[in-house]
Amino acid sequence: MYYQGDAGPYKLVVLIRTPQMIPGVAEIQIRSSQPGVRRIKFVPVYIVGEGSKYPPPPDVLMPSKEDPQFFSGKLWLMASGSWEVRIEAEGDKGSGAMAVPVPAAARNTLPMEKGLGAILFGLMALLVAAMVSIVGAARREGQLEPGVQAGSPQKRGARLVMAVAFVVVAGILTLGGFWWKAAAASLSDRMIYKPPQLFVSLLPDARMTLRIGESAWHTRRPDTVSTRLIPDHGHLMHLFLIRVPLMDRFYHLHPPEDQSGAFTDELPALSAGHYQIFADIVRQSGFPDTLAAELDMPETPGHPLAGDDSGVSASYLSPDANGNLVSPLSDGSRMIWEREAGSLPSNKLTWFRFRVEDADGNPVESLEPYMGMAGHAEFVRSDLTVFAHLHPDGSAPMAAVSLAEASLGKNSGASFASGANSMPGMAMSGMPAESRFAEVAFPYGFPKPGLYRIFVQVKRNGQILTGIFDARAD
Amino acid sequence: MAQASVPLESLRDGVAHSRAESAAAKIPWFVWSGLVAVSSIAFGLYWDISWHMTIGRDTFWTPAHLAIHFGGILAAFTCTYLIFSTTFGHDQAARDASVNVWGFRGPVGAFLTAWGGVTMVASAPFDNWWHNSFGLDVEILSPPHFVLGLGILAVQIGVLVLIVAEKNRAAGARRSKLTRLFLYLSGLGLFLHSMLKSEYADANLMHSAVFYRAVAIGTPTVLVAYARASGHKWGATIVSSVYTVVMLTFLWTFPLFPAQPKLGPVYTNVTHMVPMEFPLLLIVPAFVLDLVLNRFSNRGAWFQALVAGTAFLAALALVQWPFGSFLISPLARNGIFGMTNFAYQEPISMHQLAYKFRLDSTRSVFWLGMGAAWIAAFLSTRVGLAFGSWFLRIRR
């Protein structure tokens, strides 16, 4: 989770690495863009529901010795669901608070490492042998008066008791083994997040319908996750169609929900091929889901793109791509990736800055908000295992950000006494429609090494423009 | 001058004799050490459960964990020393009263306790892996906690065996002293045993068969085995009294310590350490057990188990059924009966569920469950008698 926001007078960039397993401990890193922040307090609470009412006392982050603008610590997330981390920064300019949405979901159970497994197995074997021997000794000598030697009845009895003890212990271990497997399976089943299935079908007249499948994981968490949807940037669903494996076609559509709960939309003109579909939705709790499906598409004449929908044709994603820094845009301008020299490390916060300039190389200064944001960026790994939809604020959906901001004003705990109203910078999500600019930047870190294609979407003169960049993360 | 005529020799003899007697009555250091160890583990476990209900944030280094580790380590060191000193030392009396395991010599209890200590230690990396793989503790009874529980059980029984072997060889004042210590430790054993079942011991379950089944499985074993092993006429009553006193002391003192949750989500705004529930009224069925077993002591073990097991379950139901009604009534919602204590994870909207009985779905389900409880009480009593007799025969 990457997030940039204002805690009162301080601009902070927050990185939260959630653990594979929830309950677990996440890593939190905060960088202040200016000096003067002395300490940062933070506390996680659910965004909505009963669990949002009583924030526990906050933890305190102190600045790092080497870099006084950098703070890091551990964040305990004890249950899956839609959390917010309330952050209060204190420093030279007073204090200010902000709330960062953090969707927490258990992703994986870890298999046991071989070394640990061997040690535990060895210990178990030793303990079994020891227990059988102790029981044998108790039978052989335990009941004799001191100094009396064990005779053959005792020795025989001990052998019998040891055999019985071994059978009992083996039985307990076998039952324990069954129990372990059952407990692990039930925990995995209850706790591991699975995105709901997305059922896609093509209709006549170049239309497509999508239906979101049931998910026990979601229904089990009616408050902290929920199954109901709320709009994000004015749309219940952000649908991305990418022709794979070459990623040479990219569409960003917004199918509306019909009365039956399905999402049906007119398709734009599409070239035939195999398409990967990603659908971003946000639940009532602020919890985001990215649903995925695949579809073989025939050549589709389609309908003209309208509203916030967009599409673009691109060159093939080549496995030996070294990356480009310039991407031509459909209105004759071009997008420049202001990439810093050097490699792109994975798992490290990086600012991805893009500038739009005209044919003569002058910044256009005429970009306008696109669905309330300066820009939208999609980072897609070549094998499709990573799909991230980013904004200049970071990876949190704006719908969740708005909920978190609202809750900060409503339910502030003792340490977060000042509500949202008293905090400049907390007032709104998104940006004013009249803003104009030439540059857009996204905070992100590639989750793993590999080849990525980045689609950067901005709006200029009412037209949606998509820049395409390839990058290799180390 | 009558006193002056007492020969000096006989006076000296008398002093020497009483010294020898007091030396003989002296309780060996390892018994005290074992008692401290088990007390520390028992207190630590209760504290840990309360910690989870109140504060939540759990690390290896919480004071509750330290109390458990201290107990485990003290027990393991005590017994390892005892085994090494018996094996390699020159104390012939100690060697004579020892058993041989893999070439080492020591009392049976020392080996059991050492085994328990090692098992407790072995559960730590297992538990750590479990946390990483399946999440931090969400339930009391996970496989690694079961291993830890086995270790604790072995330490506790090991120390009991250490004491009982000494007691069985002793006579007079020394024997009574050891019996008292044995009964105290047995009470802690029952206390530990009850913690394992606390999930089924809620007041709102006291009109369901599951409660009686949970108590009938194992609890008569503990009471009967320890009572018989103690050789005391009212052993079960005393053991359950120790349990009751410890539970009540904690129920009434833990809330005196202010504390607050350090982990979200916080559903109940807890302001002090949350104790466990009011103790079960085991003292009554335990007294009945003592009565019945004393009355039928000359009969066969199976017959004793049948009568005593049945009487135990009947007495339990007779007291616990109306007491359950009392506990869920407004009269029990105070500090004395503790029915206002809720863990921070419990949503306020769910509190009222604590005051409503969770009944069996049908009458036949209830009676089937009670039938199972009756069989469990009978078999548990029989196992208790067998263990008790074994305890009585231990000499080393």
Image (cartoon, coloured by chain):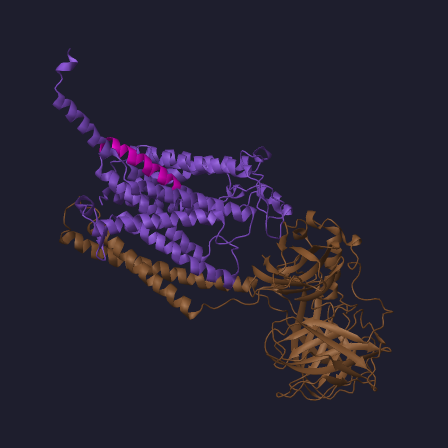
Chain colours: A brown, B purple
Quarter holding the N terminus of chain B is top left
Q: Position of residue A55 (x, y in %)?
A: 65, 50
Determine if residue B200 is in view. no
Q: B274 or A273: which is nearer to us?
A: B274
In the image, is B13 to the left or to the right of B367? left
Q: B266 or B7: which is nearer to us?
A: B7
In the image, is B147 to the left or to the right of B20? right
Going 34% across and 65% down the picture, which residue do you hit?
A: A122
* Residue A187 against residue B361 in the figure, above or below: below
Determine if residue A379 is in view. yes
Q: A237 or A413: which is nearer to us?
A: A413
* Residue A167 against residue A240 in the figure, above or below: above
Give yes or no for residue A284 being in the magenta stretch: no
Q: Position of residue A293 (x, y in %)?
A: 65, 77
Q: Position of residue A335 (x, y in %)?
A: 77, 82
- Taken as a whole, is the magenta stretch helix, strand or loop? helix
Quarter holding the C terminus of chain B is top left
Q: Position of residue A336 (x, y in %)?
A: 75, 82
Pick out the residue farthest to the top: B1
* Residue A380 against residue B325 in the figure, above or below: below
* Residue B261 against residue B20 in the figure, above or below: below
Q: Which residues are magenta?
A: B171-189
Pick out the residue farthest to the front: A66
In the image, is B192 to the left or to the right of B351? left
Give yes or no for residue B172 being in the magenta stretch: yes
**Number of numbered markers:** 0
Instruction: Indicate the quadrant where residue A316 lies.
Output: bottom right
Going 63% across and 69% down the picture, which residue do you hit?
A: A195
Instruction: Indicate the quadrant where residue B36 lies.
Output: top left
